[in-house]
Amino acid sequence: FDNPHHQDFKKYVEEKTGVEVHLIDAFNDIAAANSSITPLWVQVPAVLEQVKEIAAQYDKIIAVGYSQGGVIWRGMIESWDNHNVDTFISLASPQHGTADFPPKYLDFVEKKFPDLDEQLHKLAESSKGWKLLDEMLHFVKSFHPLKVAAELMAKLLAKLSLYIPPIQENFAPSNYLLLPAFNNLYLKTKFFPELNNEAGTEKAKSRQKDNFLRLRKLILIGGPDEDVVNPGNQSSLVQNKGQ
C-alpha cells in the first residue's frame, strides 16, 4: 500500500489518464497478525469487502494486481457475483502457480525471516507435517531409483514441504505452489485447486467460471526475464509443459 513504487504508479496513471486510482490497504505489515503471508483463503474475502465499497462508486472498474496481488484479484473476481470489473491486468502474478522459488521471494525471506527454517520446522512438528514429509521422502526415493545428489534432494524436499498443511495455513506463498510432477499433493491443498476449478462442487465451479467470464478484457503480463514469478511463463493461465 505505502510502497513508493505503488504510489508512483498511482500518481502516474492519475496524471496521464485522469482515472482515479485506489490502492488497497490490507495485509501489508509483515510483522502484524494480518500480514501478506496470511493464507489466501483468508485474504481474498477480507480484501473483497474493501474492494466492493470502492467499486460501488463506479459503473465499472479496472483491476490491477501485482505478484501475489494478482492471484488475490483473480480469487475476488471468481467469488464476486455480478461484479463490475471490466478489465483485469495481472502483472507478474503466478496465475498458473510457481514451480520454483522466485529470486525476489528468496531475497524477501532472507531479510524478513532470518530464522525461517527454524519457524517452518516448528510448524511442521506441531502437527502431522513431518509424517507427511517422511512419506514424501519415500516417494521421492522411489521416483528417483538412481542415487540423487544430496543438494538436489534437499531442494526438492524443501519445495515439497510447502505442501504440508501447517505451512499451507501459515505461509501464503505456499498456497500457489504447483509442481506438475507432484499433482496428487497439489490437489490436496485448499486454495489453488479451487481457484483453478480443479476442485469443489460443480455448482461452485460453474459460479466461478461465470464470474470470471464477466470480464471484458484480461491482460496477463510476465516473461522469462522478470524476477517475480519463476518460471516466468507461469504468469499465464496455460500450463508450462516444460516443468
Image: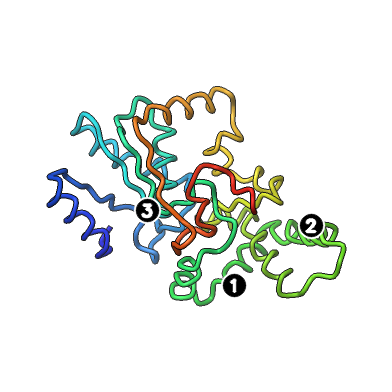
Residue 48's disc number = none
Say above or below: 195 vs 121.
Answer: above
- What amino acid is labelled 1 in the image? Asp
Residue 66's disc number = 3
**Disc 1, disc 2: CB below 8 Å?**
no
- Apparent side of residue 88 relative to residue 61 in the rendered image (left or right): right
Q: Residues within 10 Å of mark 3 (few under 14, many from 20)?
A: some
Say above or below: 12 vs 21.
Answer: below
Tag 2 secondary structure: helix
Check disc 1 and report the residue beneath it.
Answer: 117
Residue 34 at x, y = what percent?
40, 56
Q: Residue at x 85, y 58 (%)?
A: 142
Return the residue nearer the eye: 158 or 241. 241
Check disc 2 and report the residue beneath it.
Answer: 135
Tag 1 secondary structure: helix
Q: Earlier in the sequence, mark 3 or mark 1?
A: 3
Q: Residue at x 44, y 72 (%)?
A: 112
